[in-house]
């Protein structure tokens, strides 16, 4: 094997953290590695833009506008209509690569190009459910993807349009044989969903958890960090991290509502990390500290270490990257009691599982704050599960495919 080409729509966000880490691991092991994105171009770091033709697709834009106009009120999350055409195979990096590794490629990959890409060895890592659905990124219990999406509940009045999107994907994948692609799932839960899907069930699947850089995300002293941020040392602190704090799926609003009483009584504080259009209103809550988006991984690791608990109330994830980062720092986690989170959190050992039908969230948080978790044990066990040695599994897969 001589060359791997990673393809990702954007050089930002949680999915790209995974791409960038694997890219660097390839290079450390003398594997030629490059990243192809839609917009970003930094040849020195091996990141290249696909080109201007990938940036504008008028028909696709009009389709997106139409769906939003007809179904926005019904949408629970991002919905991406599949593109038919793209020009990835025309790029010089594709021609020189031995392995094509597809990551989060919504709005970039044209499904009609997949049979051409299959002339090389293809690995596809699932960062959400979009690759094997008609267009949704989280299905929220809908299982139409197992038999063929025909009336999407997330699109409301435009629900039946999903039939066309799903059929197009099915037709393109039908032109590929089952050995042409390996699907990698970062969790058992999303592996099971994909293996039961009509689109992907014929392909081989591997489970490889996302890798956390434990040279960065690890237990560490935080010195006077709280003082610099204006957070009282004695205040029990909850950390909430999301690229987009306004994304309702991440659960910030329920968190603020549930913790209104202990926030107002100064029994707890919340540190928010992520972008928000409602930053001013968030700061009006007592003892809420808004730090905005944090791009420096080492600073984010300090924030995990500074906090007593990391809370995530996401209703749908393929893995849970911030949960793994937090645990590697030794910071216990409170999360929803859903299958993918039960792969990370063992109640009472490294965090708490929250079920909205049981006890109030505020009680769960206060119990977790008062509990003496063994943070060193949490970090040690997390490092063994998510540490950089996991990248060797991907490297072994690349070698297997090109042997």
Image (tube, helix red, strand yellow):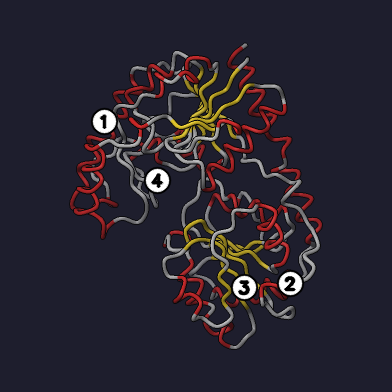
Determine whether the residue tagged by mark 3 lies in a helix, strand or loop. helix
Q: Quadrant of the N terminus?
A: top right
Q: Nearer the viewer, residue 353 or 383?
A: 383
**Disc 2 marks which residue?**
371
C-alpha span from label 4 to label 2: 36 Å
Q: Residue at label 1?
A: 167
Residue lying at the far top of the rendered structure: 403
Lower sequence index among marks 4 and 3:
4
Nearer to me, 222 or 377: 222
Q: Report helix, strand or loop for mark 4.
A: loop
Q: Residues within 10 Å of mark 4 (few under 14, many from 20)?
A: many
Q: What percent of the width, then of the height, locates residue 202?
A: 43, 24
**Which residue position is annotated with label 3?**
365
Residue 198 drawn at (x, y percent): 36, 31
Residue under circle 4? Answer: 137
Query: Which residue is at a point 51% across and 80% down the rendered structure image?
Result: 285
């Amino acid at each position: 094997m001589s060359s791997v080409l990673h393809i990702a729509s954007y050089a930002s966000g949680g999915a790209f953290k995974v791409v960038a880490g694997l890219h660097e691991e390839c290079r450390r092991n003398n594997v030629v590695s490059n990243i192809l994105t839609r917009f970003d171009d930094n040849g020195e770091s091996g990141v290249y833009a696909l080109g201007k033709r990938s940036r504008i697709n008028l028909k696709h834009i009009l389709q997106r506008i139409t769906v939003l106009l007809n179904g926005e009120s019904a949408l629970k999350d991002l919905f991406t209509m599949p593109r038919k055409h793209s020009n990835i195979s025309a790029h010089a990096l594709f021609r020189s690569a031995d392995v094509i590794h597809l990551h989060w490629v919504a709005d970039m990959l044209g499904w009609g190009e997949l049979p051409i890409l299959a002339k090389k060895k293809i690995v596809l890592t699932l960062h959400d459910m979009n690759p094997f659905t008609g267009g949704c990124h989280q299905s929220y219990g809908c299982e139409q993807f197992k038999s063929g999406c025909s009336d999407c509940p997330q699109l409301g009045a435009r629900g039946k349009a999903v039939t066309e999107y799903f059929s197009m994907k099915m037709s393109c994948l039908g032109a590929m044989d089952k050995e042409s692609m390996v699907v990698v799932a970062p969790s058992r839960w999303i592996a099971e969903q994909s293996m039961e899907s009509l689109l992907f069930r014929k392909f081989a699947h591997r489970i490889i958890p996302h890798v956390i850089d434990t040279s960065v995300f690890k237990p560490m002293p935080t010195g006077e960090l709280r003082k610099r941020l204006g957070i009282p040392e004695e205040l029990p602190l909850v950390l909430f991290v999301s690229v987009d704090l306004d994304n309702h799926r991440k659960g910030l609003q329920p968190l603020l509502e549930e913790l209104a009483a202990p926030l107002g009584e100064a029994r707890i504080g919340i540190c928010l990390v992520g972008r928000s259009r409602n930053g001013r209103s968030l700061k009006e809550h007592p003892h809420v500290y808004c730090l905005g988006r944090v791009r420096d991984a080492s600073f984010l690791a300090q924030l995990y270490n500074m906090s007593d608990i990391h809370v995530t109330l996401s209703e749908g994830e393929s893995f849970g990257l911030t949960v793994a980062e937090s645990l590697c720092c030794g910071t216990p986690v409170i999360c929803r009691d859903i299958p993918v989170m039960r792969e990370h959190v063992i109640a009472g050992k490294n965090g708490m599982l929250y079920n909205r039908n049981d006890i109030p969230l505020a009680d769960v948080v206060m119990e977790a704050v008062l509990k003496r978790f063994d943070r060193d044990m949490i970090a040690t066990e997390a490092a063994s599960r998510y540490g950089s040695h996991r990248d060797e599994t991907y490297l072994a897969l690349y070698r297997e495919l090109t042997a």
